[in-house]
Amino acid sequence: MKLSIPAAGLAAALLFGTLVSGAAAQTLDTPMALVAGDKWTYRFHNKGDKREPYQYSHLVKAVDGPSVWLQGESREPNARRPRYVWRYDVARNEGVELFEPDDAAPHGAGTRVVDRTKIDSWLQFPLAVGRKYTVKRAWDNGRGFDEYSAEVQAFEKVKVEGGEFDSYRIRFAGFWNQREGGSYSGRSEHVVWYAPMAKTVVKWNYTNRTSNGGPWNDTATELVKWEPGAAN
């Protein structure tokens, strides 16, 4: 799976980022800062298969300059990695390196298993309604890539189990492209809601189609609990 914020207070948002008020929209100049103890719990559901939804959580264990270290736990039945560690890039506002857990290693990060440091980030700041940009992301397995045209469509309230948040709705429309084991492509779309007060995407819908145009993946992720760290 790949990776919104409430209006519990505009003042709180201003403490961590630069949120500029406008008559018709809001502009967020920089990502919201994370602090040790911030924790998010999400529910993931692939509506295209018969498996039950499952939850996973991310906890900020340490802030180290431009990097934040997140401890992840998945409740997916028979998960390949029930525990894992992300190195989160503050400027990019997303995890860029995934590690196997190793309690004896610095930040608990053992062997690196995913490297996303050289691909485009999903959220590109500043965020403002009407802004457009492009995103190209190589697959973790190296067999292809996704390419999207992104547009910040609205600044609106979105309600999820974890609360109601003022959020930027961003649509990514484009194609997946396989380049190994045959050359194939198909349509793909993500719609995400980024909430500055929650410092994260609180809702993420993803659909794609096969190269023949038939339905394929249809997933929904939403925040079910947001626990701010003590320093907030």
Image: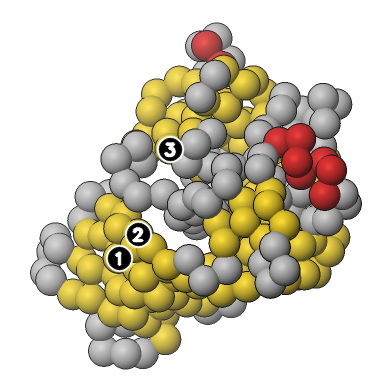
Q: CA distance from mark 2 to mark 1?
A: 6 Å
As drawn, the label of residue 147 is 1
Residue at the spot of label 2: 135
Circle 2 crowding by C-alpha within 10 Å: few under 14, some 14–19, many from 20:
some
Tell me where residue 3 appears, x and y as whole percent: 54, 54
Determine which quarter of the picture holds residue 147.
bottom left
As drawn, the label of residue 115 is none
Q: Are marks 2 and 1 in contact (CB under 8 Å)?
A: yes
Three-letter amino acid code of the residue under disc 3 = Val
Q: Nearer the viewer, mark 2 or mark 3?
A: 2
Identify the residue at horizontal 76%, vertical 49% (top origin). Answer: 197
Q: Nearer the viewer, residue 191 or 168?
A: 168
Q: CA distance from mark 2 to mark 3?
A: 15 Å
For mark 3, give the secondary structure: strand
Circle 3 crowding by C-alpha within 10 Å: few under 14, some 14–19, many from 20:
some
Q: CA distance from mark 3 to mark 1?
A: 18 Å
Three-letter amino acid code of the residue under disc 1 = Glu
Circle 1 crowding by C-alpha within 10 Å: few under 14, some 14–19, many from 20:
some
Q: Establish if 104 lies above or below 220.
A: above
Tell me where residue 108 appears, x and y as whole percent: 56, 18
Tell me where residue 175 appears, x and y as whole percent: 30, 74
Residue 228 shows up from this direction:
yes
Mark toward the start of the polypeptide (2 vs 3): 3
Three-letter amino acid code of the residue under disc 2 = Val
Identify the residue at horizontal 82%, vertical 41% (top origin). Answer: 12
For mark 2, give the secondary structure: strand
Mark toward the start of the polypeptide (2 vs 1): 2
Identify the residue at horizontal 72%, vertical 69% (top origin). Answer: 23
Q: Establish if 86 lies above or below 196.
A: above
